[in-house]
């Protein structure tokens, strides 16, 4: 069956079609005959799970769980918000559709463009996320108008036995109202699309009668076809719809212009109402960065520029499943409170038409550059994008900077560029799976040959794995290179069984020379992946990764979001190992605390912390293991239903253990245990544990880190100590209540921080006994701080209560390990109540 898809480049001239109204013509356009309006959807209902079609009074049902329907301010009154995999409306109408002439009009404000399924849809099978569709998927009778996966206006209709598709050449804007229209006249054999009152595409269509199915379901906000992935509908619109009409005539250009100019819409507020939407979600974190909705995974491109932190990540805005990947964008002034911005990159026709996959970002001479993996139906290529302040929109290079994988080196794939500087040269490494001989991971190496990063020379492989000897799997993705000075690291995420591993060594301009064959694990228990790194405002190497949910599709569909970012961490290299500590800015999250000293506990103990409980908190504890063979914590505990998550160190097996076997009685959540071997030195164990709903991040002895997920029932929130085989003692333990942080919602934009306080330091320089004097202290005020060495590693924790009579805190020049601080520059950084302070210290 022939499809009419002829593109008429000069359609305005060939068909004599109208164009944008001449601004010098003062003749008013003829009024539209309202009696020709067959269907009209105003969406002005204030609540409820239905909408009303005002011409026939037909009731349409909004798809989704009861109470899930959302409205926003529209072009006039309210508008219907749709969320990709739910939120559209459907119903039936009892009207006679016109035989030869029809027009469909409506307003649309997309948050993202709809999904085209990478492995299930042909490129010619365009998605039509319709503002109106009554197409019978079996016979194709009916009319549909919407946008495709690239944001182009798209329409479909049927004349006799012929199916007609028409697609505009230009893309509509994200997060702005656009007025789109479809005109069909089968007596003259013309069909046209309009954007904001102006004709943007015209094609020839067959003469004859328009085919309709009067019994077909009408969809508002979704294509009529059934297209799914993992139980998610993939062809719904993500955004908002308003003022949709079907007319029993083809409107003139002047009439379409009149419909467009009837209203003057403001910028739509498409931010997700986080507080309302997730009010009953006890598993959603509040101070960890998480997507406002739908899907996120690999973080990349952490930058600090213009006094702001920018983090990018893989995003599908259409639902919590992996497909049609964009680059999401988050901005923060402190690495703690984040605001989600409009995505900066998304698929467009060409080499990245299927997805914008992972990559990296760098700053060169004050100019930021994004390097990304562009995916089409064949193989990946490397793309480039640039931006100017405030870095909210980015411009892609028109063609890939590396168009194809090296043909002379057999490989399985090619993705995830990471760019770094070595002396005066810039290099790019790209993850791959090598297939000459033993299947193994590897890194292709490229060298920049142009100042604008558009030309690169292939340099072979920078590093190759040997799975038998080093356990690094068959493929490497999301690589990282960083030079700490005396040593450099290369970190890879190996597949299968994803794990972040790294080597220390040196780069000679062609190869990375490893110190050891077997890499180190980044996490002592593997549940954090794909970290992104960048120095913070103070020069501390800061990392953020992704902590997967580990749940199934049913749970993701229920909660409406997928995956969480780690808290920011400071990395240092000590004795050829990466040490990870919580970023000092996290101190500002601390609220009131409960304090305990010298608490003894054993396997028969319960509730030794006197009913301590919470869902958002930080534990800081020093535990003497005594005679216990297992020592740690029982979190998310509820004896009444038998729920608890155990996190402990096992001295018998010399390993950290996360016991989730009784973590939840709920379905569709992970219950598997996790562990990682590590031999702790004899003595006390220092713990910092951050619990945020379903997220748990653990830091041990200011060097080790791991993360996990736990999905308890509502009310399972008790905090307790855990021991087996003997008696242990918590010599000092504090539980800080935490509020704030996370992703900004509609009503809560990240607050502007006041200027940093700089206390007077005396004597300075000195060899010991530093004093830090604060001013304007009128009441008892808590001070919490760390002293950091020049590499950003915390060497001394300081906590004290000051008041109007005692405004000084002291540091005697000794570190927490009992050794005297060596000569050099140190920084003290922390909080006086909720105000950030820092000061430079010079140790003689």
Image: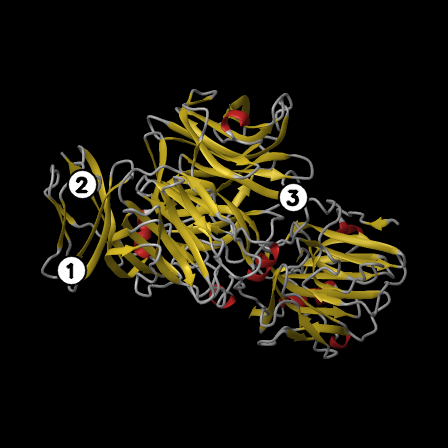
Binning the other alpha carbons within 10 Å of mark 2 as few (below 14), some (14 to 19) or many (20 upward) gives many
167 horizontally vs 662: left or right: right
Q: Secondary structure at mark 2?
A: strand
Mark 2 sits on what residue? 841
Task: Determine the image quadrant of residue 251.
Answer: bottom right
Question: Where residue 637 is drawn, which disc sits there?
Answer: none
CA distance for labels 3 and 2: 53 Å
Mark 1 sits on what residue? 776
Nearer to us in this view, 597 or 328: 597
Does any portion of residue 27 appear in the rendered image? no
Does any portion of residue 335 appear in the rendered image? yes
Against 356, residue 175 (above or below) is: below
805 horizontally vs 445: left or right: left
CA distance for labels 1 and 2: 22 Å
- Precedes in sequence: disc 1 or disc 3: 3
Q: Secondary structure at mark 1?
A: loop
Residue 792 pos. (x, y %) = 29, 39
Question: Where residue 354 is drawn, which disc sits there?
Answer: 3
Q: Mark 1 and 2 residues: CB-CB less than 8 Å, in contact?
A: no
CA distance for labels 1 and 3: 58 Å
Against 286, residue 313 (above or below) is: above
Binning the other alpha carbons within 10 Å of mark 3 as few (below 14), some (14 to 19) or many (20 upward) gives many
Nearer to us in this view, 145 or 693: 693
Residue 782 pos. (x, y %) = 21, 58
Nearer to us in this view, 759 or 582: 582
- Precedes in sequence: disc 3 or disc 2: 3
């Amino acid at each position: 069956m022939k499809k009419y898809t002829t593109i008429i480049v000069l359609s305005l001239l060939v068909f004599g079609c109208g164009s944008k109204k001449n601004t010098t013509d003062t003749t008013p356009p003829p009024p539209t005959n309202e009696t020709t309006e067959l269907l009209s959807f105003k969406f002005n209902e204030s609540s409820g799970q239905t909408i009303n079609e005002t011409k026939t009074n037909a009731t349409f049902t909004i798809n989704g769980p009861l109470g899930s329907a959302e409205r926003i301010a529209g072009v006039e009154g309210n508008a219907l918000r749709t969320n990709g995999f739910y939120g559209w409306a459907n119903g039936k109408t009892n009207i006679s559709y016109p035989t030869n002439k029809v027009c469909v009009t409506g307003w649309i404000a997309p948050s993202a463009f709809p999904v085209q399924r990478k492995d299930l849809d042909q490129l010619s099978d365009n998605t039509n996320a319709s503002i109106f569709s009554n197409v019978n998927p079996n016979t194709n009778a009916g009319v549909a108008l919407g946008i495709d996966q690239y944001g182009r206006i798209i329409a479909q209709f049927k004349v006799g036995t012929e199916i007609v598709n028409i697609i505009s050449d230009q893309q509509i804007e994200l997060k702005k109202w656009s007025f789109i229209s479809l005109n069909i006249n089968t007596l003259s054999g013309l069909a046209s699309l309009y954007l904001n009152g102006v004709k943007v595409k015209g094609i020839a269509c067959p003469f004859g009668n328009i085919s309709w199915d009067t019994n077909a379901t009408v969809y508002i906000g979704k294509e009529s076809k059934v297209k799914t992935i993992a139980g998610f509908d993939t062809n719904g619109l993500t955004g908002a719809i308003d003022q949709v009409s079907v007319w029993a005539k083809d409107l003139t250009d002047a009439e379409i212009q009149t419909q467009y100019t009837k209203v003057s819409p403001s910028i739509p507020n498409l931010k997700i109402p986080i507080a309302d939407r997730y009010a009953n979600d006890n598993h959603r974190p509040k101070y960890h960065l998480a997507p406002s909705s739908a899907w996120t995974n690999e973080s990349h491109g952490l930058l600090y520029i213009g006094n702001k932190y920018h983090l990018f990540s893989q995003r599908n805005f259409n639902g919590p499943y992996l497909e049609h990947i964009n680059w999401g964008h988050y901005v923060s002034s402190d690495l703690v409170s984040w605001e989600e911005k409009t995505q900066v990159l998304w698929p467009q026709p060409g080499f990245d038409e299927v997805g914008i996959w992972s990559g990296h970002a760098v700053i060169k001479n004050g100019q930021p550059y994004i390097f990304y993996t562009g995916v089409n139906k064949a193989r990946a290529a490397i793309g480039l994008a640039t931006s100017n302040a405030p870095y909210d929109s980015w411009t892609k290079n028109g063609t890939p900077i590396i168009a194809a994988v090296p043909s002379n080196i057999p490989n399985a794939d090619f993705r995830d560029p990471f760019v770094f500087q070595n002396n005066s040269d810039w290099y790019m490494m790209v993850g791959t799976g090598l297939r000459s001989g033993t299947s193994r991971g590897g890194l292709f190496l490229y060298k920049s040959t142009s100042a604008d990063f558009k030309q690169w020379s292939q340099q072979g492989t920078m590093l190759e794995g040997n799975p038998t000897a080093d356990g690094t799997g068959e493929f490497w993705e999301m690589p990282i290179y960083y030079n700490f000075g005396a040593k450099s690291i290369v970190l890879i995420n190996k597949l299968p069984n994803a794990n972040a591993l790294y080597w220390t060594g040196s780069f000679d301009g062609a190869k990375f020379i490893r110190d050891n064959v077997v890499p180190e694990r980044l996490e002592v228990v593997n549940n954090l992946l794909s970290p992104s790194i960048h120095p913070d405002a103070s020069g501390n190497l800061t990392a953020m990764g992704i902590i997967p949910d580990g749940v199934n599709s049913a749970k993701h569909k229920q909660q409406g979001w997928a995956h969480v970012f780690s808290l920011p961490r400071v990395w240092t290299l000590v004795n050829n190992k990466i040490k990870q500590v919580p970023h000092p800015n996290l101190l500002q999250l601390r609220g009131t605390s409960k304090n305990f000293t010298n608490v003894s506990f054993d396997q028969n103990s319960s509730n030794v912390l006197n009913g301590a409980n919470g869902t958002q908190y930080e534990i800081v504890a020093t535990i003497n293991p005594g005679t216990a063979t297992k020592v740690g914590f029982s979190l998310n505990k509820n004896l009444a239903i038998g729920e608890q998550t155990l996190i402990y160190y096992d001295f018998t097996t010399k390993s950290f253990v996360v016991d989730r076997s009784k973590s939840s009685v709920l379905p569709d959540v992970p219950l598997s245990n996790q562990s990682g071997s590590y031999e702790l030195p004899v003595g006390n164990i220092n713990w910092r544990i951050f619990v945020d709903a379903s997220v748990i991040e653990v830091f041990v002895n200011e060097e080790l880190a791991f993360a996990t997920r736990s999905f308890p029932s509502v009310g399972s929130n008790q905090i307790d100590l855990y021991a087996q085989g003997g008696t242990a003692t918590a010599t000092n333990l504090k539980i800080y209540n935490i509020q704030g942080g996370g992703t900004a919602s509609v009503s809560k934009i990240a607050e502007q921080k006041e200027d940093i306080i700089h206390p007077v330091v005396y004597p300075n320089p000195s060899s010991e006994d530093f004093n830090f004097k604060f001013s304007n202290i009128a009441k008892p005020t808590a001070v919490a701080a760390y002293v950091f060495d020049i590499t950003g590693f915390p060497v001394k924790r300081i906590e004290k209560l000051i008041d109007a009579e005692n405004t000084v805190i002291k540091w005697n020049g000794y570190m927490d390990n009992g050794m005297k601080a060596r000569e050099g520059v140190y920084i003290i950084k922390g909080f006086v109540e909720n105000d950030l302070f820092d000061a430079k210290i010079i140790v003689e």
